[in-house]
Amino acid sequence: MEHERSFQKQPTIFLNKKQGAGKASKTGRAERYTRNVGLGFKTPREAIEGTYIDKKCPFTGNVSIRGRILTGTVMKLKMTRTIVIRRDYLHYVRKYNRFEKRHKNMS
């Protein structure tokens, strides 16, 4: 996300149209670029109806999702542009014929 004082716009939306340049259309909202990223992810409502500009957002920017998808619970948001997630998993101990809980923190 940009925090500068420059004019924020999505590069995929052309604002210099002859009629209604950059204004809200008949629906009451300004034009906004969103896309379907695939892999079973739905585009969030905030991405469709929001006003934020982020070129590194997979729903409104120019970032493709590829490789592995990490799942976990968010533990900390204290670092800038970084989060710490906790991934829980079960480890099998053959001697006791049981599983034990383990976890890893990833950032």
Image: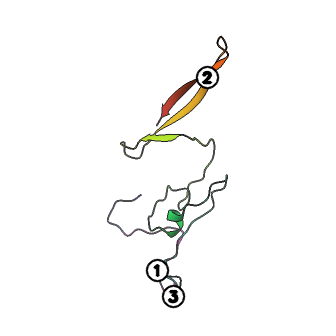
Q: Which mark is residue 22?
A: 1
Q: In this rendering, would 81 be left or right of 43? A: left
Q: Name the residue under label 3.
A: 18
Residue 68 versus residue 101: which sits nearer the camera?
101
Q: Give whichever of discs 2 and 1 has the lower sequence position.
A: 1
Please name the residue shown 56% across and 54% down the image.
Answer: 63
Q: How many residues crowd around disc 3 within 10 Å: few (fewer than 14), some, or many (20 or more)?
A: few
Please name the residue shown 60% across and 63% down the image.
Answer: 35
For the stretch drawn in magenta, what is the main secondary structure? loop
Indicate the position of residue 61 as horizontal and vertical percent values.
53, 60
Q: Residue furthest bottom?
A: 19
Residue 97 versus residue 18: which sits nearer the camera?
97
Q: Which residue lies furthest to the top in this view?
A: 95
Q: In this rendering, would 5 be left or right of 21? A: left
Q: Give whichever of discs 2 and 3 has the lower sequence position.
A: 3
Indicate the position of residue 28 as horizontal and vertical percent values.
49, 82
Q: Which mark is residue 91?
A: 2
Please name the residue shown 47% across and 83% down the image.
Answer: 21
Q: 58 above or below 13?
A: above
Which three-letter amino acid code belongs to the residue tagged 3?
A: Lys
**Region rendered in magenta:** 7-21
As helix, strand or loop, the secondary structure at mark 3 comes to loop
8 in the magenta segment: yes
Which three-letter amino acid code belongs to the residue tagged 2?
A: His
The N terminus: image quadrant: bottom left
Which three-letter amino acid code belongs to the residue tagged 1?
A: Gly
